[in-house]
Amino acid sequence: MSRRAGTAALLSLRVAYGLALIAAPEKVAGNRWLGPGARAAAAQVPLRGLGAREAALHGLALAALFRGAPVRPLLGASIAGDLTDVGATAIARGGLPEGSAAATAAVAGGSALLTALAAAHADA
């Protein structure tokens, strides 16, 4: 798989994740991340906002990739968002299901790492 195809696949998965958060935030963010609190309407508002961020940011990056436009700044914004998710979850870890902070660090941190690898080879 070429680097461009790998980046496109990564970005497409992130768009799909964002759309899933918008459509069913309690299912995507429940259990492992936020637990039963994800079912509360007050939690679904920012979860859908997170979904919109994911879909929009990665959709823009995907469009830039296919146009041959610079994609690295958008990938940098994606990394910043992932690291913010890790930090926010770590701060709130006392009120979250056991293991949630570690799981978020692994998933969002891994996502940030994959995106950083894509960024290292982007726009070259």
Image (spheres, rainbow, N blue to C red):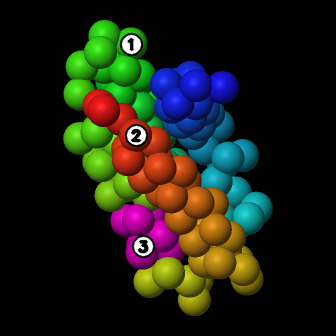
Specify whether 10 is left or right of 103: left
Disc number at residue 8? none
For the question of whether residue 57 can be seen, the reply is no
Residue where numbered disc 1 is placed = 66
The residue tagged 3 is 88
Residue 79 visible in image: yes
* Quadrant the N terminus occupies: top right
Q: What is the quadrant of residue 39 in the picture?
A: bottom right
Q: Residue at x 73, y 64 (%)?
A: 32
**For the point 76% across and 61% down, which residue is it?**
31
Residue at horizontal 40%, vertical 40%?
Answer: 121
Q: Which quadrant, please, contains the C terminus?
A: top left
Looking at the rendered structure, the kind of residue marked 2 is His
72 falls in the magenta region: no
Is tag 1's residue or tag 3's residue first in the polypeptide sequence?
1
Dot 1 and dot 3 residues touching (CB under 8 Å): no
User: How packed is label 2: few (under 14 Cα within 10 Å), some, or many (20 or more)?
Assistant: few
Tag 1 secondary structure? helix
Farthest top residue?
67
**What residue does disc 2 label?**
121
> Local crowd at mark 1 within 10 Å, few (<14), some, or many (≥20)?
few
**Farthest front residue in view:** 124
- Mark 3 residue crowding within 10 angstroms, few (<14) / some (14–19) / many (20+): few
Q: Secondary structure at mark 2?
A: helix
Which of 4/95 is in front? 4
Earlier residue among tags 1 and 2? 1
User: Looking at the picture, which amino acid does disc 1 mark?
Assistant: Phe
Q: Which of the two discs, 3 and 2, labels the residue nearer the N terminus?
A: 3
The span from disc 3 to disc 2 (Cα, nearest Å) is 29 Å
Residues in magenta, as a range: 83-89
